[in-house]
Image: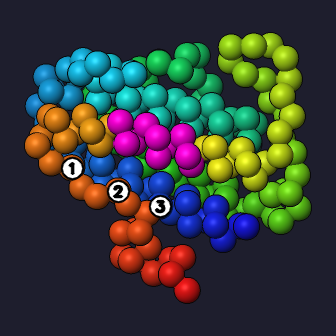
């Protein structure tokens, strides 16, 4: 199971890198334009992805930044957001790398931002949610990027596997 999450952490980093590199071609106006997505603009969507990862990583590790809202804009500037994204992806990779099998089969307790009651959840399905959430909103960002730039790179897991050989044996 740990190998699966290690692959997903690497894929997450790879896909984010490709998405941010493609977004570099946009003007500030395009990047901030409200296109009717759930978080409005590409900026809002990419910020939400970082916000959510920071929330989950704080729950998982007990440390790190604590965003105050799911739609919080951490960085208006793409370059600053990209640097923060790179650091968070490294943090996720390190967290997964350091997980023991016992930890993966264990439980985590946390409180939601929207409700005060404590939640107890198995760690492995929670990690699956973390990576699935990234994929879900990255898909929205991919669509926005395609609308704005006319093209966006493939973020398919199979492309990542073919490029890296991870998960192919």
Percent x, y of residue 41: 28, 23
| Viewer-side residue, 39 vs 56 | 39
Look at the numbered disc 3 and give the secondary structure of its residue.
helix
Say whether residue 75 is visible: no
Q: Indicate left or right for 102 with 72 as reference.
A: right
Q: Position of residue 40 (x, y in %)?
A: 32, 19
Q: Give the quarter of the image for residue 85.
A: top left
Label 3 – label 1 distance at C-alpha = 17 Å
The residue tagged 1 is 152
Q: Which residues are magenta?
A: 131-140
User: Against 12, is 100 above or below?
Assistant: below
Q: Residue at x 71, y 44 (%)?
A: 126
Q: Position of residue 31 (x, y in %)?
A: 20, 29
Q: Earlier in the sequence, mark 2 or mark 3?
A: 3
Q: Is residue 139 above or below residue 44?
A: below
Q: Which label number is shown at residue 155?
A: 2
Q: Residue furthest bottom?
A: 169
In the displayed structure, 40 sits above or below 108; it is above
10 Å crowding of disc 2: few (<14), some (14-19), many (20+): many
Residue that appears at 29% across and 30% down: 42
Does residue 3 belong to the magenta stretch?
A: no
- Real-space Cα distance between discs 1 and 2? 9 Å
Pointer 3 residue = 11
Is the C-beta separation of discs 1 and 2 under 8 Å? yes
């Amino acid at each position: 199971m740990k190998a699966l999450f290690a692959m997903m952490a690497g894929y997450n980093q790879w896909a984010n890198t490709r998405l941010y590199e493609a977004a570099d071609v946009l003007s500030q106006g395009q990047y901030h334009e409200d296109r009717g997505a759930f978080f409005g603009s590409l900026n809002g969507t990419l910020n939400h992805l970082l916000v959510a990862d920071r929330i989950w990583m704080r729950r998982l590790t007990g440390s790190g930044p604590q965003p105050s809202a799911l739609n919080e804009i951490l960085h208006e500037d793409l370059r600053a957001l990209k640097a923060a994204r790179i650091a968070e992806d490294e943090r996720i990779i390190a967290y997964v790398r350091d997980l023991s099998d016992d930890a993966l089969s264990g439980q985590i307790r946390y409180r939601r931002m929207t409700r005060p009651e404590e939640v107890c959840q198995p760690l492995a399905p929670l990690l699956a949610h973390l990576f699935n959430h990234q994929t879900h909103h990255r898909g929205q960002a991919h669509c926005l990027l395609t609308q704005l730039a006319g093209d966006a790179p493939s973020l398919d897991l199979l492309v990542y596997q073919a490029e890296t050989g991870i998960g192919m044996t």
